[in-house]
């Protein structure tokens, strides 16, 4: 099984990469990254590519499954236009690359509340991304919609630490319908997305 990942340097993307590399069923992992990852693995091949050139990238081999965990915050992006480019346009471009490479199963990290008609900028961007990917017609497409992500990040601001701490405090209080808003560790999101993408039948699925 040959797998391609984009966004492997982030919290969930890195977990996806590690879990797949440790899976004996994985034969090869092709990582598309803007910069070198800083480590190697016998199963892993890293291709450095600017994400605005993903659609033009060519590979000589068929890829079975794709995973995308690209995403940023408005603070890191610097502008709404730049955040849309990363969270929406680059993800759709990765989907187009996957379709060209023969991918039959695609797993995407989205967000709880994603909706292209939302009045919230972030949720609308995620919803537009989902619609753009769906229109590609990849046979099995899975979107995972986590709440706030918990786990070690390479770049953590004081605000990130504060929100993670607050999330851990209020999570036990979220029950019933509010349970879905609990913070969740990136490793659990990665595990669920991998399992669902590899096992789901043809169609569009939301987790």
Image: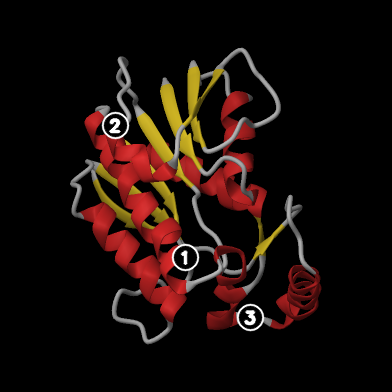
Instruction: Assign a secondary structure to mark 3.
Output: loop
Q: Which mark is residue 103?
A: 2
Asked whether, in this view, residue 184 is left or right of residue 85, the answer is right
Please count the marks in the image: 3
Mark 2, other Cα within 10 Å: few <14 / some 14–19 / many ≥20: many
- Residue 76 located left or right of residue 6: right
Alpha carbon of mark 2 to alpha carbon of mark 3: how far?
Answer: 38 Å
Quarter of the image for residue 36 reads: top right
- Crowd class of label 1 (few under 14; some 14 to 19; many from 20; radius 10 Å): many
Location of residue 77 in the rendering, given as x and y in whole percent from the top left corner: 55, 64
Most foreground residue, 72 or 107? 72
Q: Is residue 123 above or below residue 35?
A: below
Give residue 44's position: percent from left, percent from top: 56, 20
Separation of disc 2 and disc 1 at Cα? 26 Å
Local secondary structure at mark 2: loop
Pair 2/1: label in front: 1
- In the image, taking residue 23 as reference, residue 62 lies left or right, namely left
Specify the label residue 175 is tagged with: 3
């Amino acid at each position: 099984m040959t797998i391609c990942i984009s966004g492997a340097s982030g919290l969930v993307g890195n977990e996806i990469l590690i879990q797949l590399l440790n899976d004996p069923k994985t034969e090869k992992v092709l990582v598309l990254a803007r910069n070198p990852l800083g480590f190697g693995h016998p199963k892993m091949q890293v291709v450095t590519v600017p994400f605005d050139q993903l659609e033009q990238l060519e590979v000589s081999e068929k890829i079975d499954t794709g995973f995308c965990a690209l995403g940023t915050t408005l603070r890191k992006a610097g502008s709404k236009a730049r955040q849309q480019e990363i969270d929406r346009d680059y993800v759709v471009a990765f989907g187009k690359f996957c379709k060209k490479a023969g991918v039959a199963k695609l797993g995407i990290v989205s967000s709880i509340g994603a909706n292209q008609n939302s009045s919230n900028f972030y949720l609308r961007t995620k919803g537009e991304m989902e619609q753009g990917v769906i229109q590609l017609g990849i046979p099995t497409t899975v979107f995972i919609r986590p709440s706030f992500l918990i786990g070690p990040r390479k770049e953590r601001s004081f605000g990130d630490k504060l929100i993670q701490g607050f999330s851990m405090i209020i999570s036990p209080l979220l029950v019933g319908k509010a349970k879905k808003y609990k913070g969740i560790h990136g490793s659990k999101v990665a595990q669920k997305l991998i399992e669902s993408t590899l096992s789901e039948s043809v169609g569009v699925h939301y987790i």
